[in-house]
């Protein structure tokens, strides 16, 4: 069965607002998680990662939160811009492979 | 910034024919991967490759599939006798180690007629 999943398939957000994308995973042994962004016609693009010994990590305009108690991962995008419109995937790593969730399509409204 | 490059961007092949998809991973990466994405679905793992051998493969990666690193820069995926259901985007990825981010190419769209 699917070990990684996202709560909502679509998210519409006003330009300038913050976006929150959620992900649930089922494998409690997972120790490394990655968020990817996929634009139309492109491959997944690395955004940010987090290891299980952390609960928060920040990048440029993005923050990833990890709650191991409830096996939940989220990606926060600050001041969402039109260029942030894409499909976002969370992925967990294990045994030389990535397991992807189904993806959330983010649409930014002008 | 170094990139994973894939060729061709689009491959159209008759059912039953062999196809080879090509990838040039990032030069200092040691781990190589193939994934596929059927239209509208999530990205699925096919195979990982390290030190000239397969590290892991999924149930999708049956006897019709093979991978090869023929030289110091290329990494290929071969499908021996293509089926209609092999139509998908195929992504190559590479990473420095098994526990570091995998970086993806922009894929090859494979269309089987």
Image (cartoon, coloured by chain):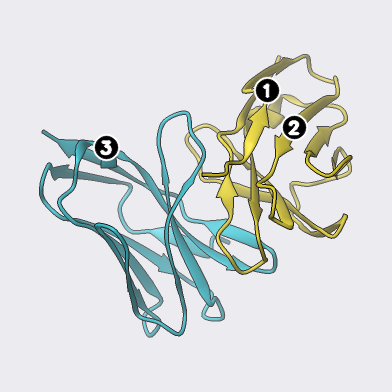
Chain colours: A cyan, B yellow
The answer to whether residue A93 is above or below residue A61 is below
Q: Quadrant of residue A96?
A: bottom right
What residue is pinned by disc 3?
A83
Is A65 placed left or right of A31 in the picture? left
Chain letter for mark 1, please: B
Point 40% across, 36% down: residue: A39
What residue is pinned by disc 2?
B22
Chain letter for mark 2, please: B
Point 54% across, 75% down: residue: A27
Q: Are marks 1 and 2 in contact (CB under 8 Å)?
A: yes
Is B29 placed left or right of A78 in the picture? right
What is the quadrant of the C terminus of chain B in the image? top right
Is A12 placed left or right of B60 in the picture? left
Residue A106: horizontal and vertical position, in percent?
27, 43
The answer to whether residue A41 is above or below residue B25 is above
The answer to whether residue A105 is above or below residue A89 is above
Chain letter for mark 3, please: A
What residue is pinned by disc 1?
B8
Callout 1: few (<14), some (14-19), or many (20+) C-alpha neighbours within 10 Å? some
Q: Which disc number belongs to residue B102?
A: none
Is B3 placed left or right of B76 in the picture? left
Query: Reading the chain from its start, which is encountered first: label 1 or label 2?
Result: 1
């Amino acid at each position: 069965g699917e070990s990684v999943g996202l709560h909502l398939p679509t998210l519409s957000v006003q330009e300038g607002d913050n976006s929150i994308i959620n992900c649930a995973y089922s494998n409690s042994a997972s120790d490394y998680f990655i968020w990817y962004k996929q634009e139309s016609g492109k491959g997944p693009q690395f955004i940010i990662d987090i290891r299980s010994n952390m609960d928060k990590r920040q990048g440029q305009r993005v923050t990833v939160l990890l709650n191991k108690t409830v096996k939940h991962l989220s990606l926060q995008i600050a001041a969402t811009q039109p260029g942030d419109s894409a499909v976002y995937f969370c992925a967990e790593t294990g045994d030389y492979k990535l397991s992807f969730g189904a993806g959330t399509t983010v649409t930014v409204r002008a | 910034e170094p990139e994973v490059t894939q060729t061709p961007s689009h491959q159209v092949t008759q059912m039953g024919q062999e196809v080879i998809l090509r990838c040039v991973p990032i030069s200092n990466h040691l781990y190589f991967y193939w994934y596929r994405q059927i239209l509208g679905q999530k990205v699925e793992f096919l195979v990982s490759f390290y030190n000239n051998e397969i590290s892991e493969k999924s149930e999708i990666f049956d006897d019709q599939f093979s991978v090869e690193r023929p030289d110091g820069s290329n990494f290929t995926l071969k499908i021996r006798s293509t089926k209609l259901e092999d139509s998908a985007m195929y992504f190559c990825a590479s990473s420095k180690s098994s526990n570091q981010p995998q970086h993806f190419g922009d894929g090859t769209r494979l269309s089987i007629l």
